[in-house]
Amino acid sequence: MRFTVLTLFPDQITDHLGKSITGKAMQNGIISVEAKDIRDHAINSYGKVDDTLYGGGTGMLMQCDPVYDSWKEICSDGNKPYTVYVSPKGNVLNQDKVIDLSKKDHLCIICGHYEGIDSRVIDEICDEEISIGDYVLTGGELAACVIIDSVSRMIEGVLPNQEAYSNESHMGGVLEAPQYTKPENWHDRKVPDVLLSGDLKKIQDYNRIMSLIETMNKRPDMFDKLEITEDDWQKILALKKSL
Ligand code: ADE
């Protein structure tokens, strides 16, 4: 999958994503990440890309043309990428959206800075506006990295095995069951006996019910959306009692 980020700070993107799992996926050619400097399409030779706001207000707004020309350049092969503007006004990112985006061939993410970008160019070229949460960042670069990281790990070959993501939190609308490694007993906190039993069926049943309990305790909003069978309710209550 191909990612292109239009930004005033390309190093922020490549420094972060060039490492660890995303870095390896780039080296293996499973994903490509290109960060394009919007300033290469500045209005003048001083690198001007922003101006004051019409109607008053503090700060500077990024102008249409540098953003539009940067985007047009990546469309020059005749293919329009799926284009996303990252901003606190967008739809809040979740795992369903991440999976959706992982099916695109080419994703272009546009990062704003200062007060953001002139709305007209966003309206003209963006398919969607995405926020990574209800808070405001100093620029869109961290949001772009979050999107690329979460989308990349849904692409076959990026993680070592499929199971690594099919059972994890937010897949199927539930959180993952608590997980443990050695030692068996740490600070008098013992790993549940069933996980040491070697009985795969019992372990799977236990983890399935623990994942429902974890969701109920930590994300009641997600739990409310689940349809719990009578049988599972009984198992949840019995397991909760034994904890
Ligand atoms: N830019 C500034 N704040 C943001 C947010 N919460 N999500 C995405 N992009 C942003």
Image (cartoon, rainbow, N blue to C red):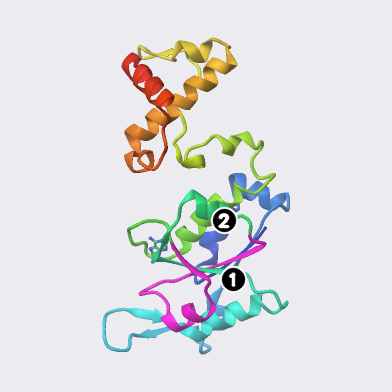
Residue 178 in view (yes/no): no
Percent position of residue 147, x then y: 51, 56
Q: State the mark number for residue 166.
A: none
Residue 243, placed above or below residue 226: above
Q: Is 189 placed left or right of 193 in the picture? A: left
> Which numbered disc, 2 or 1, marks the residue that appears first in the sequence?
1
From the viewer's side, name the closer residue of 196 and 54: 196
Q: Is residue 109 magenta?
A: yes
> Which residue is situated farthest in the front direction here?
230
**Residue receiving disc 2:** 100
Percent position of residue 162, x then y: 65, 37
Give the extent of the magenta segment: 104-130
Q: State the mark number for residue 36.
A: 1
Mark 2 and mark 1: Cα distance apart in space? 24 Å
* Labels 2 & 1 near each other (Cβ < 8 A): no
Judged from the image, the secondary structure of the residue bearing numbered disc 1 is strand
Q: Quadrant of ligand 1?
A: bottom left
Q: Is the CB atom of the residue marked by disc 1 within 8 angstroms of ligand 1's nearest atom?
A: no
Residue 233, placed above or below residue 149: above
Q: Is 204 placed left or right of 61 in the picture? A: right
Instruction: Identify the residue at horizontal 37%, vertical 56% (top origin).
Output: 133
Tag 2: residue type? Asp
Tag 1: residue type? Lys
Residue 212, placed above or below residue 99: above
